[in-house]
Image: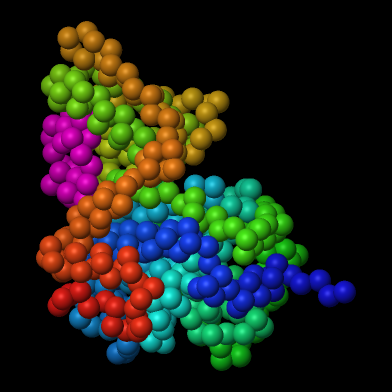
């Protein structure tokens, strides 16, 4: 009896799965996050670092037939995936699979979009590749039980991107397995970029998307790669962090873990979101502003503290610093009664009233709390002596605290009406209509025309 490696089993699943095999909730989830990720990527086209990367990529690549969002110039598939991947992750406004701390769509979507367009695939084929790729990225992250400091979205997302790309290129089982092995050869991305609030953090999703496209293209042309990608002596789980190949494959094709992906309500690290909800609840209930407050304490888990608990310092990259600061998030929510794309712009980040308020915020870590993104306790000591408290138990965008389709459409419109080429109201509505019916599109090369974008 021949025992298939985990890589070979994944490859068989990728090749065998068609649109008709996908459960309805998986299809709807894929469309939901397609709309969400497309919008956040459009908004990210003018984020710090975006123009610099555009110049770098366009100066180093020839003409192609893959669209770069909000730009009239097209590029080769890998280059388009790199740019669109950076845009999608730039504002930290994209969906996240909590179990593995993986943001699947910002890697898989750019890779799948580039090849769906160049292959002139149907919307059904595109959606199928997207659903398969996202599931594999999330499974890979969820199966890892220890992380040495890798940036999970990139190191796991590259497998999702390669899977989606292989599906759209029509690779057979053997070539698809090689594509996953070639993705492993390129898996990279470090949390040091996040720790230092550097712009390259935003590029990691794009680099992984480009790597996934390249892996599938190389495999199509006959390049071979290791077959024991995950469980091998020098495989992914031996080198990158302890993992369980059985968990990677558990229920493969029977259930899709991506239906548990969380939609982001705010354009900041997910670890900030319960605190933003709590701050908005107290500010609105008691009509608070910075001059009404003497002190604030926020109690969070160790994991949340590791991402967003440090002292706020705008530094050289104020937008990234704001997105990864629970102090800024709370102060901004109280002072402005919202945290949208407008609130992560440099002029708002420099607001003296917000900065005066955030200096009154103390972060307390509760070592017994195991949660990654929830809960949090917020306490405000008002100048009139009142102690105002709010406990936020569930992350916004989860099944316990869901966003509605109306919320998602509003978020898309807010995102799409910004960026380097803002959409009009009519264009936003056309885009929403097209994306939510993407399975009816006959040719993805024509799917991005929303009325002159």
Viewport quadrant of the N terminus: bottom right
Residue 42 appears left or right of 9: left
Residue 241 locus on image (x, y percent): 63, 54
Q: Main secondary structure of the magenta part?
A: helix
Is 171 situated above or below 343?
below
Where is the C terminus found, in terms of image quarters? Answer: bottom left
Q: Is residue 360 left or right of residue 418?
A: right
Q: Quick check: 176 left or right of 314?
A: right
**Which residue is painted at 26% across and 76% down in the image?**
448
Quadrant location of residue 223? bottom right
Judge whether 145 appears above or below 205 on screen.
Answer: above
Q: Over which residues does the magenta segment extend?
A: 333-359
What x and y, as percent, mark residue 122? 40, 81
Position of 436 relative to 287 (above/below): below
Q: Is residue 334 magenta?
A: yes
Q: Position of residue 244 (x, y in %)?
A: 69, 54
Quadrant position of residue 198: bottom left
Can residue 21 be seen in the rendering of this structure?
yes
Residue 199 drawn in magenta: no
Closest to the observer, 31 or 203: 31
In the rendered image, residue 282, in percent from the top left (x then y), is placed at 25, 24
- In the displayed orientation, state which residue is furthest to the top: 385
Q: Residue at x 34, y 22 (%)?
A: 390
Q: Is residue 331 left or right of residue 303?
A: left
In percent of the image, x 17 and y 49: which residue is there? 342
């Amino acid at each position: 009896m021949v025992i298939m490696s985990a890589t070979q089993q994944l490859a068989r699943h990728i090749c065998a799965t068609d649109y008709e095999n996908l459960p309805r909730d998986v299809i709807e989830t894929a469309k939901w996050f397609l709309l969400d990720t497309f919008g956040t990527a459009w908004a990210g086209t003018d984020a710090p670092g975006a123009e610099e990367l555009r110049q770098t990529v366009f100066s180093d690549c020839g003409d192609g037939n893959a669209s770069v969002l909000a730009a009239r110039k097209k590029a080769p598939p890998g280059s388009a995936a790199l740019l669109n991947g950076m845009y999608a992750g730039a504002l930290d406004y994209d969906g996240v699979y909590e179990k593995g701390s993986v943001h699947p769509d910002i890697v898989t979507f750019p890779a799948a979009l580039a090849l769906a367009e160049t292959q002139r695939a149907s919307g059904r084929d595109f959606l199928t590749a997207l659903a398969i790729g996202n599931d594999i990225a999330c499974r890979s992250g969820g199966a890892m039980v220890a992380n040495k400091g890798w940036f999970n979205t990139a190191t796991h997302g590259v497998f999702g991107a390669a899977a989606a790309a292989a599906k759209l290129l029509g690779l057979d089982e053997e070539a698809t397995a090689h594509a996953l092995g070639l993705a492993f050869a390129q898996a990279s991305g470090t949390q040091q970029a996040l720790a230092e609030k550097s712009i390259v953090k935003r590029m990691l999703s794009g680099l992984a998307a480009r790597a996934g496209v390249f892996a599938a293209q190389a495999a199509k042309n006959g390049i071979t790669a290791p077959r024991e990608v995950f469980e091998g002596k020098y495989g992914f789980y031996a080198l990158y962090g302890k993992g369980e190949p059985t968990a990677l494959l558990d229920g493969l094709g029977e259930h899709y873990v991506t239906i548990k992906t969380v939609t982001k309500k705010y354009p900041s690290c997910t670890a900030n979101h319960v605190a933003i909800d709590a701050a908005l609840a107290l500010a609105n209930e008691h009509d608070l502003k910075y001059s009404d407050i003497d002190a604030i304490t926020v109690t969070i888990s160790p994991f949340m503290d590791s991402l967003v608990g440090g002292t706020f310092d705008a530094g050289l990259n104020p937008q990234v610093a704001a997105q990864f600061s629970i102090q800024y998030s709370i102060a901004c929510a109280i002072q402005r009664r919202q945290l949208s794309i407008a609130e992560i712009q440099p002029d708002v980040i420099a607001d003296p009233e917000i900065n005066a308020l955030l200096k009154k915020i103390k972060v307390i870590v509760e070592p017994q709390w195991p949660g990654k993104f929830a809960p949090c306790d917020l306490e405000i000591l008002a100048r009139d002596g009142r102690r105002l408290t709010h406990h936020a138990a569930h992350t916004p965008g989860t099944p316990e605290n869901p966003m509605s389709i109306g919320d998602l459409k509003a978020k898309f419109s807010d995102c799409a009406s910004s960026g380097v080429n803002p959409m009009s109201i009519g264009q936003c509505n056309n885009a929403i209509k097209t994306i939510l019916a993407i399975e009816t599109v006959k040719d993805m090369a024509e799917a991005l025309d929303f009325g002159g974008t």
